[in-house]
Every structure is written in structure tokens, then in C-alpha cells.
Amino acid sequence: MPVDAWPELLRWYDVHARDLPWRAKPGETPDPYRVWLSEVMLQQTTVAAVRSYFARFTERWPTVDALAEADEGEVMAAWAGLGYYARARNLVACARAVAEEHDGIFPDTEEGLRALPGIGAYTAAAIATIAFGRRAVVVDANVERVVTRLFAIETPLAAARPEIRARTDTITPDDRAGDFAQAMMDLGATICTPRNPACAICPLSDICTARRRGDPEAFPVKAPRAARPHRHGDAYWVEYRGQVLLVRRPAKGLLGGMLALPTGQWTEAPPPLSGAPIDARWEEGGAIEHGFTHFTLALTLRCAEVRDAPVDGIWWPADRIAEAGLPTLFAKLAARGLAWREQRWKGAA
Ligand code: SF4
């Protein structure tokens, strides 16, 4: 049983730790604000995708107090493209709670961190250990893969999670717990990869059960995946004097609080034109497919230019739609809308 995993692993980490912009350099004290921000951004997202967002956020809002004072709409717009938008709303709520209730200083325990908006068990453990050096059991997708291989855990995900956590607990040291957590993440990201793990240069190879058995890629065992349901709907590109109608989506629910094009209902069967915000002669402007966690969505874009006083809404200059901070789904549709617009101009020329 690999209870002594950590000395080898930490020796490896001291040499091979990834250079990440939110990480403290050796000898520096970690900044809890940067650790927290990166951990929230990294949920469900890759390091590569997060780098530029992290740089922009920390340049614009360099401290938790600065973020606490930010306009929520501006933060949502800056977050656009990172997905899972409830995180951006919680980001502002959490910054305000830290600024107002904790004098701008993050609590340094898992319990204290969990009491803040948007900080769940994983994030609290990660911040407590990385920013404050507390011993905590941190299991992200990379750690999950490493641990299921080290112990050859045969139970499929997600049922295996309690066992993975318990096993990780057995190998988490009291000292340098933050480095240990980051070392496990780095090992999963760079050596113990989903395909072709580099077992020959792995600091844990001597104690890894899956390597000994010769089948590391069999772990983690995955449960058969249920097919994602498919939904359909319409979205609308309404143009009036060079401006496009946008709406702010309800705060709760999918893409909550984000600016978007108006849409109709999303249903299992393609609906007849539904949810049009205005009476108009609609032209089809193309269709897009988008995958959410629990379903895939096919949206048809309906386009029209109107001449009369239009409905209330947010009218955004069409040629500056890229600056609206639309989430990816609507940014894709807006690209179709711009293409439709260009075709019309060409037709009219
Ligand atoms: S020996 Fe191979 S399978 Fe085991 S932890 Fe290292 S890279 Fe992963």
C-alpha cells in the first residue's frame, strides 16, 4: 500500500512543478485571493483556457476588495466564454462577503471557507491547503486518476469517490500538504495522463498497482454513459437601425444573469417558431449545436430587420456585438447573425 508516496512525489515536485501564474514561487507566501480565483476558474475548465482570464481579472481587479467593488455585469462580461456562469455571480458575492464580513482577509480553515458563497468542499480544501498550508484532502479529476491507478480501484466513477477520497487521505502528509496536493495535480496533468501515462519516469511507479498490473489506462473505471437528451429551439437576431436586441437572462437557471439573444422554448421536438420577441418577416440565419452538461441543444437563428419602434430591451450596436460579453452559445449565434447581415448588404448592393 503506497502510504509513503509523498517523499518521492515532493522531490519530483521540487524540480518539475508547473509554472502557473497563480502559484507562489518557491519562498513566496501564496496570495489567497489568487489561489481562490484560480480554483474557481479551474472548476470544469482547463489550465490553458483559464490563463488569459486569470491575467485579465487580476489586472483589472488585483485584490479581493477591488473585485468586491466591481459592477456585477462587468464581471459577468469578463467571465464570458469560461462557462458555468453561476460561478461568476458567486465570485462577486464571495468577494463582497470577504470584504464586508472578514475585512478583506480570507478565512484560513476549510470550515470558514465553506461558509462563503460559491465555495464547496473541494474548493475549500484546495484553498486551505494551497494558500494556508493546512492539511486537507484535495481530489480533483487529475488526482482521481492518479489515485485510482495507484490503488487499482475497480469501482466505477462516481460511486468510487468516497473510496478515492479515503485513499487520498491515507497518503496526504501533515507537512507540505499544499505542495503535496499541487504535486498530485501536476502528476496527473503531465505524467499520469488519461492516455499513454509516462510510468517510466513517474516518481510513484514503484508503488503503483496499475503499473504493476500493466493496465493503467483501465483506470478510473467509467460507468456506461447515458445518452444526453437533445433539445431544439429558436433564437432571434432582431436588428433596428444597426442595433441588435439583447436580453438579460433570468438570474437563476442556465446562463443565468448573462446577456443573450432572445430565445423561444427549448423542447425535445423542433418547435414551430416559438418565443419571437416581435412580429417580423423572419429569415433563417443558420443553426448551431451546443453541448451542455446534461443535454445538447440545436438552435435555429431567425433574423429580421424591423423599421418601427421596437420592443424594450438592450439594443447593442451590431458591429460591436463581440464586446457584449455573450456566453459561447450566443457568441456562436451572433456570428451567424453577422453573416446574415453581410449577405443582406451584398444583396442590397
Ligand atoms: S506509475 Fe503510471 S499509472 Fe501509476 S501513477 Fe505513475 S504514471 Fe500513473
Image (cartoon, rainbow, N blue to C red):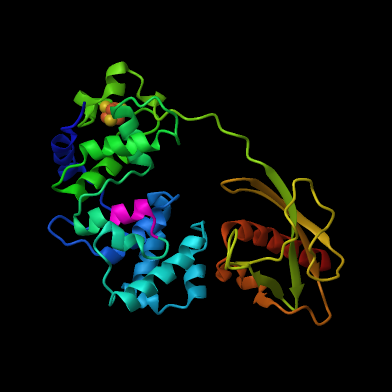
Q: Quadrant of residue 55?
A: bottom left
96, above or below 327, in the image: below
Judge left or right: residue 333 versus residue 196.
right
Q: Residue at x 52, y 63 (%)?
A: 80
Residue 21 appears in the rendering? no
288, above or below 257, in the image: above
Q: Position of residue 341 (x, y in %)?
A: 74, 65
Magenta-colored stretch includes residue 120: yes
Magenta-colored stretch includes residue 268: no
Q: Residue at x 78, y 46 (%)?
A: 269
Q: Position of residue 71 (x, y in %)?
A: 47, 78
Judge left or right: residue 223 versus residue 183.
right
Instruction: Give the residues in magenta.
Output: 119-127
Q: Residue at x 41, y 27 (%)?
A: 155
Q: Position of residue 348 (x, y in %)?
A: 83, 68
Q: Which residue occupies the extreme top position in the image?
A: 213
* In-front residue for pair 103/141: 103
Q: Which residue occupies the extreme bottom position in the image?
A: 309
Judge left or right: residue 320 versus residue 286.
left
159, above or below 240, in the image: above
Quarter of the picture holding the N terminus: top left
Q: Quadrant of residue 153?
A: top left
> Which secondary structure dominates the residues rendered in magenta?
helix
Ligand 1 is in which quadrant of the figure? Answer: top left
Q: Position of residue 229 (x, y in %)?
A: 67, 41
